[in-house]
Amino acid sequence: MSTVLDIMTFFAVLTGAFFFLAGTVGLLRFPDTLSRLHALTKADNLGLGLVVFGLLPQAGGVSAGLKLVCIWLLVLLASATVSQLIARAARQHHARA
Amino acid sequence: MIETLNTSVAVLILALAIFTIATRELFAAAVGFIAYGLLLTLVWVQLHGLDVALIEGAVGGGLTGVLVIASAARLRDTPATAAVRLGASARAAAAIVAGVVAAALAACVLALPDPASTLAPQVAANIAATGVGNPITAVLLAFRAIDTLLEVIVLIFALIGVWSLAPDGVWGGRPGPRYEADPNGILAYFARILPPIGIIVGIYIFWVGADHPGGKFQGATFLAAMWLLAARAGLTDAPPISRVWLRIVLVAGPMVFVAIGLAGAVTAGAFLAYPAGYAKPLILAIEWALMPSLALTLALLMAGAPQRPGMP
């Protein structure tokens, strides 16, 4: 059982890391603010979500696991809000320019 | 494996530090500095200094980040940033001074005895007398309480320094501009959702500080940040700094600290000494008294100098 869980952790964290890598490449390579935000949200949402999902079996307890999920939810809330604010600022800047 | 990770974090920190100094753009330097603070948090976690990691993340990455970004935004359009070019000799002198200081610091670090001299065994041997379980709290509020007292008082002096930048006409008024945001917008929504969570986390971190990593500084930073968020979203406004309650809350914590210290001089024979058996309740009393003072001091430091008259 624990081997199965370890394999699950391995693949989930690896996939999460891939999303972070892809998000970072997008952040560096995409041409404008909105597409860069799009790339970044993939890292925050899916990347961190998969890392947290992979770490859940290793958390060693329901309480620690819940804390991990809470961290993911808080990051989701913060990144969604900040993306909205940056996108709005970018649009206003664009409209003015 | 973990060695590779440590080395890459160290290299990343050095690279970020160089970037922060070398970049010509104020905003980029501010962002570099915040990332630098967050990476330092990782370093403290690796060094098992969870208390320091918490404070570095909350203050070094968070509150200082807000201060630095606000300063960068304020300085952006002023002539102060219009490229001041130093002469070649002045630049060379600055480079030499900085190089000598860095070399001296490096020499000092390399000259440290290995293993480093430590007072940790004494702390471990005497921690039972204080009644608290977290050795950091024992050091901060029992063995080296005088440092903590001075630190708290320094913060109040810093606040007085910020206030003293106010023009005469608005002295005693409300700090900073009044922030306006769409009351149905995303920022106002965020500022309604997050504070209940942040306040609970802040109080929790304060509460567990006696026995686990955490404490009043970290908890107070959380509370100050939540207030700052609500203020930036236009949901609340800073009080005029001439309010009597505000000044009482500001000095209450340090006053309780000094009073307990003076009482120690009478009952236990030394300033800031605790009579045997009363250490834990007295430490908790100081923590409880300092928490609101620290939260208000940090929030007002973020809010800045008075800019508007306080009376309607």
Image: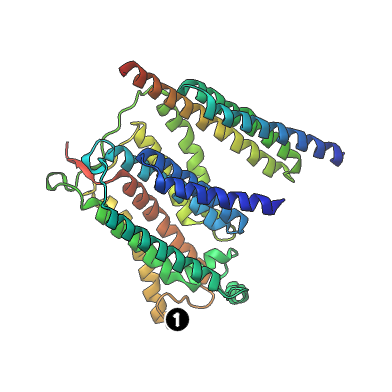
The residue that mark 1 highlights is: B268
Pinpoint residue B274: horizontal percent, then vertical percent. 47, 75
Inspect this view and state whether residue B33 appears. Answer: no
A50 or B196: nearer the eye? A50
Q: Is residue B157 above or below residue B20?
A: below
Pinpoint residue B304: horizontal percent, then vertical percent. 28, 45
Residue B211 in the figure: left or right of residue B284: right
- Label 1: chain? B
Q: Is residue A1 above or below residue B113?
A: above
Task: Indicate the quadrant where residue B239 lies.
Answer: top left
Residue B132 in the figure: left or right of residue B157: right
Q: Is residue B213 above or below residue B83?
A: below
Q: Secondary structure at mark 1?
A: loop
Residue A23 in the figure: left or right of residue B142: right
Q: Residue furthest left?
A: B169
Q: Residue furthest bottom?
A: B269
Q: Residues within 10 Å of mark 1 (few under 14, many from 20)?
A: some
**Residue at 35 percent of width and 32 percent of height:** B235
